[in-house]
Image (spheres, rainbow, N blue to C red):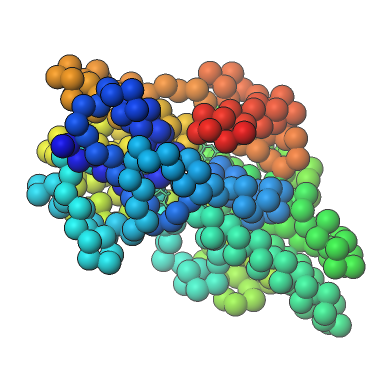
Amino acid sequence: MREIIIAGAGYAGLRAALDLGAAQRKGQLGEARLTVVDRNDYHQVVTWLHDVAAASVEAEAARIPLSRLLGDGTLNVMQGDVRGLAPKEQRILLMDGTLLSYDRVVVALGSETLWPPVPGLRDHALPLRWWNEAFALREAIMTSFADAAATQDAAERRRLMTIVVVGGGYTGCQLAGELSHWLPALADQFGLSIFDITLRQIEAQPRLVPNWQPQLSSQAERTLRQKGVQLLLDSPLAEVGPTHFRIGERPPMPYGVMAWTGGVQAPALLAESGFRTGAQGRVVVDDYLRAEGFPTAYVAGDCALWMDGEKPLPATASHALRQGEYVARSLQREFHGEPLGRYEPTKLGLVMSLGGNDAVGTALGVPLYGPTAGLLKEGIESWYLSTIGVK
Ligand SMILES: Cc1cc2nc3c(=O)[nH]c(=O)nc-3n(C[C@H](O)[C@H](O)[C@H](O)COP(=O)(O)OP(=O)(O)OC[C@H]3O[C@@H](n4cnc5c(N)ncnc54)[C@H](O)[C@@H]3O)c2cc1C
């Protein structure tokens, strides 16, 4: 009996699990036992987390119980926190001390928030990488507005109604866009004036989404400014206190809630487990998405460092999905004694939402703006849910 373990039930892991489960049901995997381990008992629709934080989707819609997705008994679904791997011994250690042995593992543990050494940042800013963090951010903004409604002090009210998004990458832009629609409604709900709202987005580089084509960055900047987002570009965050923050040498600026979306890195446990890692702590993989030197360990999604020429392939849901699919296919080939086909990334593009119907991005190299891009983004989300069996 071959033991196949999928560590992480996110975009890459869930796709691999669904495809391997389907193969198992058709008797195409031979004697194999499939186990999925995740620290949560749900799959997170990460590409909706900014919507959860800005209350534009129901929080519960963005986490789907694994029992609903993988509960037909084909796979063994385990809730457990992976502490580390021993790739030479082909074992996984969980936080509770459980040791799991595998013949093949799919490492798909996603990425974690990267905290640069800005004094006070980690103590006061709220991250947005997991469902519970999105929920906590939404609650913090609601509490800040509730406190604003309770105070008689006008300056304090304006401070509490100042929401700051740090990071001009696609997570920060998507969050700022959604907040620009929600905050006026929230002010209304608490009987507050919309003129007391300040929504700021801060980016250290001179433009938003600096790794995109300049015309897409300009379009994103124009759209967000039209929605009332105050963009502070070329503005490196220097220090964060409980009520004020500083950019460079400028005087302190007040804020009520700060969201940190400034970067991610692969989990530290990967390097600690003996995998060779490179940019963003991601695992260096061979042509078949197997960890260098460990052919029994496939790595997929944000954990995998695939070099696309000089640059790492971006950490996106769409690449994670395709990699999960590819790994499931490779495992079937391996077990049938067939040669593996080299992994080739499919570059479909990336669309980021900017609140309401607005979005910006590229599809197959074609730049897209406004409601057309918004419709495409919506279509992608619905399509994704349908592929995992959610209507
Ligand atoms: C707010 C936000 C919006 C985004 N929007 C987009 C978008 O519009 N389009 C796009 O393409 N990409 C987007 N991304 C990026 C995209 O979500 C990630 O690239 C994608 O989730 C990576 O998939 P993955 O399978 O590698 O990891 P994930 O989907 O994050 O899955 C990792 C899984 O591993 C589990 N896990 C982690 N550590 C452990 C552990 N130690 N033990 C057990 N289980 C563990 C987690 O619970 C999770 O289920 C967005 C990211 C964020 C944060």
Classify 362 as above or below 295: above
What residue lies at 78% left-to-right and 45% top-to-bottom?
A: 227
Q: Which quadrant: the C terminus? A: top right
What residue lies at 66% left-to-right and 32% top-to-bottom?
A: 378
Q: Which quadrant: the N terminus? A: top left
Q: Position of residue 373 (x, y in %)?
A: 67, 27
What residue lies at 34% left-to-right and 58% top-to-bottom?
A: 80
Quadrant of the image occupied by residue 76: top left
Q: Does residue 140 show up?
A: yes
Total tally of numbered discs in the picture: 0
2 vs 106, nearest the viewer: 2
362 vs 14, nearest the viewer: 14
What residue lies at 66% left-to-right and 66% top-to-bottom?
A: 139
Classify 343 as above or below 133: above
Q: Does residue 234 show up?
A: no
Classify 194 as above or below 42: below
Quadrant of the image occupied by residue 220: top right
Q: Position of residue 248 (x, y in %)?
A: 55, 64
Question: In the figure, is residue 310 to the left or right of 262?
Answer: left
Question: In the figure, is residue 238 to the left or right of 273?
Answer: right
